[in-house]
Amino acid sequence: MTKTVRKLFFLWEYEKEEEWINQMAREGWMLIRTGFRKYVFEKGTPGKYTYRVELLDKGMNSKESNSYLIFLKETGIELVGECNNWVYLRCKTAECRFDPGDRPLYNLTHLLKLQEFFNTLRNLFVTCIAACIVGILILEHFTPNPVVDFSKGFCTGFSMTMAFAILLATPFFRRINNKVKVAIKEMYTRE
Amino acid sequence: MNPQDNIVLTEAVFYTLLALYSPLHGYGIMQETGKMSGGRLRLSAGTLYGAISSMLEKGWIRALPGEEESRRKEYVITDLGKCIARTELTRLRELVENGTKIIE
């Protein structure tokens, strides 16, 4: 028996997403496939699998990611689904070989990957905003006509949305930075 | 890398080097290190993958030629790796000696 759930998590809500998937597993619903905003679950023994949402260094089809995923497979970790560089992994709870979340080195590695990913995204957004502003300034020199007006409106709306997205993600950036600091401090005293 | 340099190995790296005195693949390393430490050390996949990639780069271990890229790979310690492990053993001995002297 399977069921499909449609649910939206923002990119920075990956922890919430992972927790939700694991909660479903504890209730006997094992994630077997993912799509955009789509999660397919299969009925199974509650708690049989533990899930993890992880960000890969490189794209899914790169040699590095490929060899990493093959390595994981050998150790009993299955790939359930993917979305861009994000992968949904699972292993049998009894023989789980995921890194425990309390290891500073693991935390730091993962956090730096996240930081890089989101910095790239933010830079892209900022570049788009800058392009829109330049666009608007250039359009000022044209005599108003429907096309110019539309373009101006579009540029304004687009850059506003981007700016709003960056603002929305600010607390997330701050949280990651704080976590990085904590992990580094932790590494002064333990491995 | 000069083996004489003062390198402090992580537990995962030291145990992996020990396990690779005979060739093993990834999952074999996990089982062997678990056995050696009496079940105390449970290497996770991510940690081991990181350790292996880093040691391959440094030339402490090498991959045995397999049939295909996608087949499960076996690894074995190199002479440099053995030298590193020996240096680490000396360091650990010093720790144990000093610890014993003062604590017990």
Image (cartoon, rainbow, N blue to C red):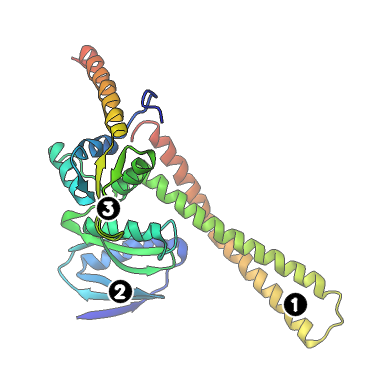
A94 relative to A70 in the view: left or right: left
Name the chain under label 2: A
Q: Is residue A167 visible?
A: no
Estimate the x, y position of residue A78 in percent, counting from the top left: 26, 63
Residue displayed at 25% across by 46% down? B75
From mark 2 to mark 3, how far is it between C-alphas? 20 Å
Around disc 2, counting alpha carbons within 10 Å, would you say few (fewer than 14), some (14 to 19), or many (20 or more)? some
Label 2: which residue?
A: A33
- Kindly identify which numbered label has been placed on residue B89: none
Question: The disc labelled 1 sits on which kind of residue?
Answer: Lys
Looking at the picture, does residue A82 appear above or below residue A115? Answer: below
Estimate the x, y position of residue A171 in percent, counting from the top left: 52, 55
Label 3: which residue?
A: A98
Q: Is residue A68 visible?
A: yes
Question: Along the line of sight, which residue is nearer the eye, B51 or B103?
Answer: B51
Does label 3 lie on the same chain as label 1?
yes
Residue displayed at 38% across by 24% down? B6
Please tell me whether mark 1 sits on a helix, a strand or a loop: helix
From mark 1 to mark 2, how far is it between C-alphas? 42 Å
Q: Earlier in the sequence, mark 2 or mark 3?
A: 2
Q: Earlier in the sequence, mark 1 or mark 3?
A: 3
Question: The disc labelled 3 sits on which kind of residue?
Answer: Phe
